[in-house]
Amino acid sequence: MNIVVAIKHIPSIADDLPVKGNNVDFDSVDFVLNEFDEQSIEQAVLVKEATGGTVTVVGVDMIGELDGVLHLALAKGADKAVKITGDDPAADSHQQAKWLAEAIKGMSPNIVFAGVQASNDLDGQIGPMIAAHLDMPYIGGVSSVEVAGDTATVNKEFAGGFGAKYAVSLPMVVGVQASTKPPRYAPISKVRQVAQTATIEKVAPSGESSARLTMKKMAPPVVTGHAEMFTGSSKEVAAKIVDLLKSKGLA
Amino acid sequence: MAAKFEKVKSVEKEHAIVDGVDISGDWNRMFEQRVITEYTPELIEKVADIPGAESFANCYQCAKCIPVCPVDIVGNYGPRKLYRYAQTGMDLTEAPELWLCTTCKNCLRVCPKEVDMIKIMPAAREQAILAGKFVPAELQQAFENTAKTGNPLGQPQRKRDAWIQNAGVTIPIIKDLARPVDVLWYVGSYPSYHPRGIDAASAAARIFSALGIDFAILGREEKDDADSQRLAGEKGLFEMMAESNIATFNNYEWKEMVVTGPHELNAFKNEYPKYGFNRPVSHYTTFLARYLDQLKPLLKHEVNVKITYHDPCYLGRHNGEYEAPRKLLEAIPGVELVEMQRNRENGYCCGGGGGGMWMDSFTAKHTKMRLSEKRAMEAASTGANVLAVACPFEVSRFEDAVKSTGNEHVTVNDILELLDRSMRGEQ
């Protein structure tokens, strides 16, 4: 079975996000693997371990630093790594989805995993658009996947703590919310060993697509209010909270 | 904590006839060869077969390690017990016991057979990590943070020197200085990022400045020493960090290195030499004790407190420094120094060593109380109102512990903060 994981390299938000012009200052920000993609790599490896097959991880190399992420994925159990030499840190999710879909086409995938969303654009478009380009069904918000033959049993999460179980026929694209088990740890000695021996296949970006959105302005949020701390005994604090709720018409 | 493993069955015999004489009774085992049938040595050998962990098999169950084991004092632990657990069915590489040792070295100090947990633990843990076995989630997070961001707290590398803005004195970055310095001060991760660590680092900067020391820091080029990650089993991560740090250290000209933390001292003095780094390193207490004559006139303000000092395992037992911290504290006018019952060579462990710093919730599940809480209670029982420390792991650990044990009247301070207070007066 051919299992493919589409990943995204995104600006880290561990630090204050530097802004330059109308966009992120990509030269002065670290790039990290989208955290939902960590879940989707784990889910892919779990499916491989249960049913056999190969896991190929593919991503757009936005700033020329994707190798580290691909080595980590290989150390965690992926078998092949492919990078699309996009080299455009501002490429939006529509463009990335097109490049990824074109690269994935030739891999004849049975199942494609993608993180359900990423913290840079939060539009959750990579998975559905890859599915549209490849003419496959898409199911997102997924928290577990089991494959038997050419059908997968998938748990999908809904708001309010509801979940549903779906049977989906392969091939399909899955947007992973969380893997069945927490992502495994890859020891650094293994990652370094992989870094010395692994080959990463390079693919030129192919096809064009765009969300056709123009960024007018990007700025850090303006701090307007402040938190008011109630002090006093628990009874006094409780009374103040009640008063506040009443004044807002909430109680 | 209930005993986890079944107690051995008695091999005493009600009746034993030796050379025709009936020696029935509880002393007959002295006369008949004892056939040991209740265990197999396989799980002991499994540990002792791991390179580095060979001495696990040396244990002859004398139990000298048990009363000095800090984890046993709040739980059921120690090398002798681990050996016995292995005899009776525990696979150390899969058991929670693998993660409880803080590598404090008190057992090795008293062990007649040199069962060396400082080597056994990292080796067995590495084996478990490489085999993809259970690793406490908090520890995994600290490993991932160190690999990704260069520090276990997961803070951005480019903010590593952000603290110097508010120290009140100029703190030169060696790269900007572009000249040789006498002292390269390795600040460390917690003093660079943790709010209470920054307090100690800022105090250190003010003290170095007041003494007129020609020093500089590495700033954003500094990365975690990773010694505790090594002891927690991530040797590959340690090697990666060591290679990076050594290259940075060798980029600049300096005469000696001073470190804020004992774990960094241990890394650079005892471990980095294995990777080619051989240069003079001292902990700040050792370094400042050399300047005691110049320091004393600067300590103008009385600090009227009763202090008890906690020996960090990696400064004391691992690196033999017990006196310098005490000399510095005694130099502060107004200070009364009192000792806890467990001090110096037999000092109790705060629980932060060997990766314990990043397994607090996990360890708490397997012990009656946190090691830091036990120690905070010991400090309070001396009547001291200040618990003085010399390790950046300890301030946050003990501040939590004095609160959770109802000893808020005990303030936790790094020695640097106390020296700084005497130098500048109450701020």
Image (spheres, rainbow, N blue to C red):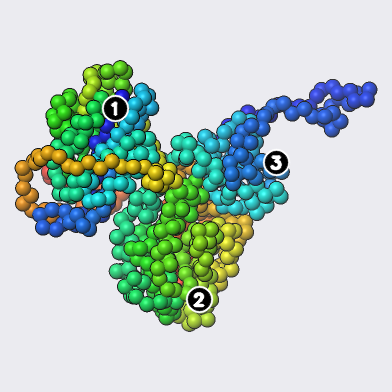
Mark number displayed over residue B61: 3
The local crowd at label 1, few if under 14, some if 14 to 19, many if 20 or more residues have their Cα within 10 Å, is some
* Amino acid carrying mark 3 in the image: Gln
Q: Are marks 1 and 3 on the same chain?
A: no
Instruction: Tell which tag, 2 or 3, sits nearer the viewer.
Output: 3
The local crowd at label 2, few if under 14, some if 14 to 19, many if 20 or more residues have their Cα within 10 Å, is some
- Residue A31's place in the image compared with B48, above or below, is below
Q: Which residue is under mark 1?
A: A2
Which residue shows up at 48% across the image and 54% down it?
Answer: B227
Q: Choose between B150 and B5: the one closer to the eye.
A: B150
Which residue shows up at 13% across the image and 29% down it?
Answer: A132
Instruction: Measure the C-alpha gap from mark 1 to mark 3.
Output: 55 Å
Disc 2 element:
loop
The answer to whether the residue labelled 1 contacts the one labelled 2, judged by CB atoms less than 8 Å apart, is: no
* Amino acid carrying mark 2 in the image: Pro
Instruction: Measure the C-alpha gap from mark 2 to mark 3.
Output: 48 Å
Q: Quadrant of residue B324?
A: bottom right
Which residue shows up at 16% across the image and 53% down it?
Answer: A24
- Residue B193's place in the image compared with A109, above or below, is below
* Amino acid carrying mark 1 in the image: Asn
Q: Which residue is under mark 2?
A: B333
Instruction: Tell which tag, 1 or 2, sits nearer the viewer.
Output: 1
Chain where mark 2 sits: B
Instruction: Measure the C-alpha gap from mark 1 to mark 2.
Output: 74 Å
At which x and y percent is residue B54?
63, 43
Left or right relative to B36: residue A164: left
Q: Residue furthest right?
A: B20
Q: Choose between B319 and A12: the one closer to the eye.
A: A12
Instruction: Tell which tag, 1 or 3, sits nearer the viewer.
Output: 1
Chain where mark 3 sits: B
Which residue shows up at 32% across the image and 58% down it?
Answer: B157
